[in-house]
Structure formats: structure tokens, C-alpha cells
Image: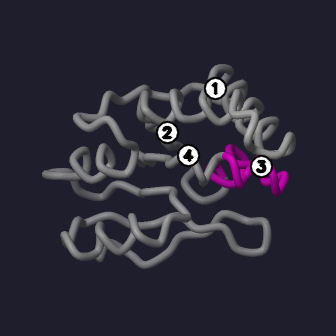
């Protein structure tokens, strides 16, 4: 199963001490994690942003480290911004899972009627949302 992950999802997993990979293994067994290059760039910017609280910067930095040490597939989105990139990436793709906490992005995905499922965080566990719209 292929899972495309958004910046806010991985940062939240770090901040809440959620075992991202353990949860994904529990849900899917075998899976492939897709991470947009823009997500990695966004994490780098967050880790260096002095306007953020230290906890936020540390979570971004730890997220980067986790992604670097993990087996992920880097994806180059056609758009500069992460959300827009995810939307264009999802065109003509089916049976993907999107790991995001962004309500606006979820709304746009549903409006476009992409055949994807969402991963959500509930009670410090990752769970599947609605099945393939």
C-alpha cells in the first residue's frame, strides 16, 4: 500500500510521541511511504524558523531525521506548495492513502472525488478514515 504523508502529520506524530512506522506496519503490514521533496524542504524551514517555539522546531528537526533514516520514496510534486503538490500528484491515481491532518486539504481532495483514503490520528494511534471516497 502506498501512503503519501503531509508535513503536519509527521510533525504531530513526533510531538505526540506516536510510533508512525509501528502504526503503519500494524495497519498495512507492507507499505511504501511517499514523501514530497517539498515536505522535506518545509521541515527544514520549520526547524530553522526562530519565530516558532523550540518544541515546534525540535519536532521538525526530529521529523527530518526520522525521514532520512527510513525507507521512503521521495516524490517531486509539480507544484511548489505541499498541498497543491499533493493534489496534482493524486490526479489519475487510485487506492492511495493520504496522511494529513489538514482539513482544507481533505476537503479539496473530497471535492475532486479522488479515490483515496485518509489516515488520521485518534487517541495517539493512527487510524484509517473513510474508505476510498
Q: Residue furthest front?
A: 51
- The residue that mark 3 highlights is 19
Residue at (13, 51) in percent of width and height:
92
Where residue 95 appears, x then y in whole percent?
Answer: 30, 58
Q: Main secondary structure of the magenta part?
A: helix
Count neighbours of disc 1 (C-alpha within 10 A) and say few if under 14, some if 14 to 19, many if 20 or more: few
Among the 4 quarters of the image, the one containing residue 79: top left
Label 1 vs 3, first from the N-terminus: 3
How far is mark 3 from mark 4, CA to CA?
16 Å
The CA span between labels 1 and 2 is 9 Å
Residue 125: x, y in percent?
A: 73, 65
Q: Residue at x 21, y 47 (%)?
A: 88
Which residue, given by chain and number where applicable, does mark 2 sit on?
33
From what the image shows, is residue 106 above or below residue 46? below
Residue 35: % across, % down: 46, 35
| Mark earlier in primary sequence (1, 2) | 2
Mark 3 residue crowding within 10 angstroms, few (<14) / some (14–19) / many (20+): some
Q: Quadrant of the C terminus?
A: bottom left
Residue at numbered disc 1: 70
Amino acid at each position: 500500500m502506498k501512503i503519501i504523508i503531509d508535513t503536519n502529520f509527521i510533525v504531530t506524530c513526533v510531538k505526540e510521541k506516536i510510533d508512525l512506522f509501528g502504526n503503519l506496519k500494524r495497519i498495512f503490514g507492507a507499505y511504501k511511504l511517499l514523501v514530497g521533496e517539498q515536505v522535506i524542504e518545509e521541515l527544514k524551514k520549520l526547524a530553522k524558523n526562530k519565530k516558532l517555539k523550540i518544541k515546534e522546531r525540535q519536532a521538525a528537526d526530529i521529523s527530518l531525521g526520522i525521514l532520512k533514516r527510513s525507507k521512503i520514496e521521495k516524490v517531486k510534486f509539480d507544484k511548489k506548495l505541499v498541498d497543491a503538490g499533493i493534489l496534482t500528484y493524486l490526479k489519475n491515481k487510485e487506492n492511495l492513502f493520504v496522511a494529513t491532518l489538514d482539513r482544507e486539504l481533505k476537503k479539496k481532495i473530497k471535492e475532486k472525488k479522488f479515490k483515496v483514503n485518509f489516515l488520521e490520528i485518534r487517541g495517539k494511534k493512527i487510524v484509517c478514515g473513510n474508505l476510498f471516497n
